[in-house]
Image (cartoon, grey):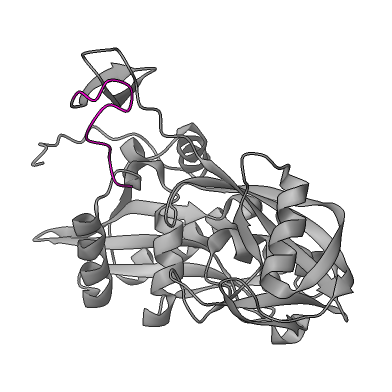
């Protein structure tokens, strides 16, 4: 997000100060503090002819790709009103709201942090056709559903398919039940989905565009580390989690290091993280690594508890911070 330069109240140049436990832009002249809050948006699952209506985006980001109809809520309308309006603008259909389908958030953007409110709806009039910034609008059956580019859209679509038998829910436990998702090495085509998952890690929220470019380069070079992803089995395949095993070789052996692991919020507490960790441990054993370390400084309390429950012990490791 582009930062403000001048105070919107008095016009003085903005500085920074701590407020509410965060370093924020603030004005030393009049006391104004600039709070960056998420923007509310709506997404609509229009159920029609046994499938769901998708639109082909006519503008960046993800121009030309298929997504759910969606858009930001205007200041003078309710979330329900916004969903009905966006549905008609982008698909040509007049719709009736059936129910609230889910609420998600996208602190990673694009282009800004937001909260997405999804509704189920059905057509009650109009004619299916692309409109506003949508090139096309058409109905996709569950077996033909394309991979949606936005993480929040993928999650709600996975839940919709699961409720209709098109995509099994990820189980909460049980080794034999893990047939619903697979763990596999990452491929180059997984990059965009992995970047969306990577942005879920709070420690990565402050990465600037140059940092993300370096991430891109390191991912494609794949030197010294291996990336594993969790993917649903049923179509459309969706990446629901990932982790990275970095390999550190020494003269007397080697160690593995986990710096990044993320699971989609709607799939947490369902055994996905444990399955990813098991894959890493098996791979580390095959590589004859002596142990695996995890960077708990990048983890929240829930993640720390997960690692502790998985058998990780705190070690007395000394470090020096380079930057």
Q: Quadrant of residue 206?
A: top left
Q: Percent x, y for residue 2?
A: 29, 46
- Residue 170 visible to an observer of this rendering: no
Q: Residue at x 22, y 35 (%)?
A: 5
Q: Residue at x 38, y 73 (%)?
A: 191
Q: Residue at x 62, y 63 (%)?
A: 153
In the rendered view, tell whether residue 277 sits above or below residue 308.
below
Give the side of residue 19 with respect to residue 171, left or right: left
Q: Percent x, y for residue 218?
A: 22, 68
In the rendered view, tell whether residue 144 sits above or below residue 22.
below
In the rendered view, tell whether residue 314 sits above or below residue 102.
above
Q: Quadrant of residue 236?
A: bottom right
- Residue 21 visible to an observer of this rendering: yes
Q: Quadrant of the C terminus?
A: top left
Q: Quadrant of residue 243?
A: bottom left
Q: Which sits in the foreground, 164 or 135?
A: 135
Q: Residue at x 24, y 25 (%)?
A: 11
Q: Percent x, y for residue 81?
A: 76, 49
Q: Which sits in the foreground, 214 or 183?
A: 214
Q: Is residue 216 magenta?
A: no
Over which residues does the magenta segment extend? Answer: 1-12
Magenta residues: mostly which secondary structure? loop
Give the side of residue 80 with respect to residue 55, left or right: right
Q: How many marks?
A: 0
């Amino acid at each position: 997000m582009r930062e403000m330069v001048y105070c919107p109240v008095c016009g003085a140049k903005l500085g920074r100060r701590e407020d509410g436990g965060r370093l924020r832009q603030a004005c030393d002249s009049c006391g104004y503090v600039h709070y960056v809050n998420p923007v509310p948006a709506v997404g609509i699952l229009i159920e029609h002819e046994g499938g769901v209506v998708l639109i082909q985006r006519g503008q960046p980001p993800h121009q030309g790709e298929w997504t759910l109809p969606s858009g930001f809520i205007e200041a003078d309308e309710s979330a329900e009103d916004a969903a009905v309006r966006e549905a008609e603008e982008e698909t040509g259909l007049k719709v009736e709201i059936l129910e609230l389908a889910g609420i998600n958030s996208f602190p990673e953007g694009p282009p800004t942090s937001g909260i997405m409110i999804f509704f189920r709806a059905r057509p009650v009039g109009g004619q299916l056709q692309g409109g506003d910034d949508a090139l096309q609008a058409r109905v996709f059956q569950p077996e033909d559903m394309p991979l949606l580019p936005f993480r929040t859209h993928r999650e709600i679509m996975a839940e919709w398919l699961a409720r209709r038998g098109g995509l099994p829910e990820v189980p909460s436990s049980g080794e034999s039940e893990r047939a619903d998702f697979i763990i596999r090495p990452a491929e180059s085509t997984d990059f965009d989905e992995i970047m969306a998952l990577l942005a879920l890690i709070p420690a990565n929220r402050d990465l600037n565009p140059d940092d993300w470019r370096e991430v891109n380069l390191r991912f494609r070079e794949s030197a010294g580390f291996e990336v594993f992803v969790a993917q649903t089995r049923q179509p459309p395949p969706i990446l629901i989690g990932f982790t990275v095993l970095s390999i550190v070789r020494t003269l007397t052996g080697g160690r593995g290091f986990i710096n990044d692991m993320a699971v989609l919020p709607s799939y947490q507490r369902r055994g996905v993280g444990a399955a990813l960790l098991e894959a890493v441990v098996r791979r580390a054993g095959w590589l004859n690594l002596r142990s695996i370390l995890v960077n708990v400084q990048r983890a929240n309390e829930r993640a720390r508890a997960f690692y502790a429950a998985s058998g990780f012990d705190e070690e007395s490791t000394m470090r020096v911070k380079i930057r």
